[in-house]
Image (cartoon, rainbow, N blue to C red):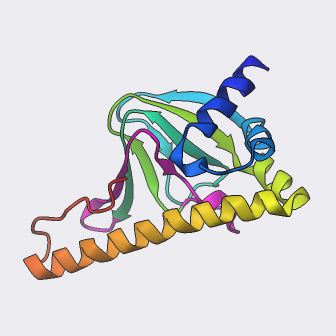
Amino acid sequence: MIETKNICTMLAENPFFEGMPAPHLETIAGCGKLVRFKAGEFLMREGEEANTFYLVREGEVAIESDVPAAGALSVARVGAGGITGYSWLFPPHRNSFDSVALTNVSTVALDGKCLRGKTEADHELGYQLMKRFAQVMLDRLQAARLQVLDIYANGENEGTTDAAAD
């Protein structure tokens, strides 16, 4: 019970959840737990089952995609207050990207299966989450677009940027 109360407070203080009604925060907190990762550890792997999203409390996480013959391509960097993992929302519930800790990372891990059940029972909660994740996805899509333009403007594989930093 104490951890759930702490998680609810952490959610309420995070910009991602700004304006979300307190009862919804309490419901979401009931699906959460505190998780830590050491630098170099993966929070999630591309292609694996997606049943968790993470609210980064401390540290930095790289969101990457494996590019054949080129290795990992950084899509975004997420610091304190950022979110990683939205594939839990969409069938077939497989991670679209890797998320790897660049430093020691402290997170609130939110169980996607738990939340899917809660959002089916409370469509307003589902709407509140969906509009927040849609904004994250739009921001990351725009950042990826800028990276592609930068790559083509500077020649292939020269000076890629981390335009998607949160």
Q: Is residue 108 magenta?
A: no
Q: Is residue 152 visible?
A: yes
Quadrant location of residue 134? bottom right
Q: Is residue 155 visible?
A: no
Where, quadrant-wise, is the N terminus in this rendering? top right
Q: Residue furthest right?
A: 121
- Image height check: is 2 above or below 104? above
Q: Residue furthest top?
A: 2
Relative to 110, 24 lies left or right: right
Quadrant location of residue 126? bottom right
- Image height check: is 82 above or below 140? above
Magenta part of the chain = 67-95
Q: Is residue 75 magenta?
A: yes
The residue nearer to you, when weighing 120 against 101, is: 120
Q: Position of residue 120 (x, y in %)?
A: 86, 60
Quadrant location of residue 159? bottom left
Relative to 27, 131 lies left or right: left
Q: Residue at x 45, y 53 (%)?
A: 98
